[in-house]
């Protein structure tokens, strides 16, 4: 099997080098490009065609959210995993809403890095427990916006399924837990997408968080 092609976008050389060294310990991954801001990254995409982009949020010239928005505007399907620090919770939710496949702390361990990349290549959303904790803590500190709260929009089962998705569970695992067929889980997900006006798992999680529907 050919290695997954990875692009690293971060304005800190040390971060890029650290991730590159970790990735090169496995023959499953190949770093095919590095950029220090979103503008550089967008200019390189057509040449290197990465399978996954590891994207920082705060960068000069063009930041991570703006770069993800540009990819979305161009209908570029390249999955993005956001690289984050401990003070960027609101930006993380914004990235999810734009379709990012997951988030990684910049000091994440090797196993978590590999697992997230492989999930992104499969089109899955994987959110680590520590990051979900931080997102929910940030939401708890703010008074609820009653105009955005729609706790009855989803059924109890749909809410449970979306909570499971947010925790990184696959459709097959959710089906086993609920004692239903995997296709039934996928049908529920389609219903969730329609109700929330989204078209991906990551966008569904972000929208549900913003509206106060999801309680993790």
Image (tube, rainbow, N blue to C red):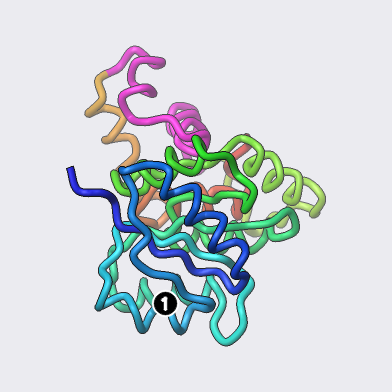
Q: What stretch is highlighted in magenta?
A: 152-180
Magenta residues, dominant SS class: helix
Locate residue 66 relative to residue 44 in the image: left or right.
right
- Residue nearest the viewer, comparing 174 with 33: 33
- Residue nearest the viewer, comparing 77 with 42: 42
Q: Which residue is drawn at 66% across and 38% down?
A: 130
Asked if residue 169 is among those painted magenta in the image, a careful observer would answer yes
Q: Point out residue 208 in the picture as x, y percentages from the top left corner.
A: 54, 48
Q: Residue at x 47, y 56 (%)?
A: 20
Q: Which residue is drawn at 61% across and 35% down?
A: 129
Q: Point out residue 164 in the picture as x, y percentages from the top left corner.
A: 48, 30
| Residue position marked by numbered label 1 in the rendering | 41
The image quarter containing residue 52 is bottom left
Q: Point out residue 186 in the picture as x, y percentages from the top left corner.
A: 28, 35
The C terminus: image quadrant = top right
- Residue nearest the viewer, comparing 41 with 214: 41
Q: In this view, does 190 lie above or below 88?
A: above
The N terminus: image quadrant = top left
Locate residue 186 relative to residue 93 in the image: left or right.
left
- Judged from this view, the residue extending furthest toward the left is 1
Structural crowding at the residue carrying mark 1, measured as other residues with C-alpha within 10 Å and reported as few (<14), some (14–19) or many (≥20): many
């Amino acid at each position: 099997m050919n290695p997954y092609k990875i692009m690293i976008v971060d304005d800190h050389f040390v971060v890029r080098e650290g991730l590159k060294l970790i990735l090169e310990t496995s023959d499953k991954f190949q770093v095919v490009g590095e950029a220090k801001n979103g503008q550089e990254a967008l200019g390189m995409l057509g040449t290197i065609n990465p399978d996954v982009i590891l994207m920082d949020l705060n960068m000069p010239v063009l930041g991570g959210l703006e770069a993800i928005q540009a990819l979305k505007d161009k209908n570029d399907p390249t999955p993005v995993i956001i690289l984050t620090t401990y003070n960027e919770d609101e930006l993380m939710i914004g990235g999810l809403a734009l379709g990012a496949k997951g988030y990684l702390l910049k000091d994440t361990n090797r196993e978590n890095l590999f697992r997230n990349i492989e999930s992104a290549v499969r089109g899955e959303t994987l959110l680590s427990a520590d990051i979900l904790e931080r997102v929910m803590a940030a939401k708890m500190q703010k008074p609820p916006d009653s105009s955005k709260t729609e706790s009855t929009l989803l059924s109890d089962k749909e809410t449970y399924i979306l909570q499971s998705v947010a925790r990184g569970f696959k459709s097959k695992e959710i089906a086993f837990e609920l004692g239903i067929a995997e296709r039934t889980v996928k049908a529920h997900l389609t219903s969730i997408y329609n109700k929330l006006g989204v078209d991906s798992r990551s966008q569904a999680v972000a929208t549900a968080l913003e509206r106060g529907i999801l309680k993790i």
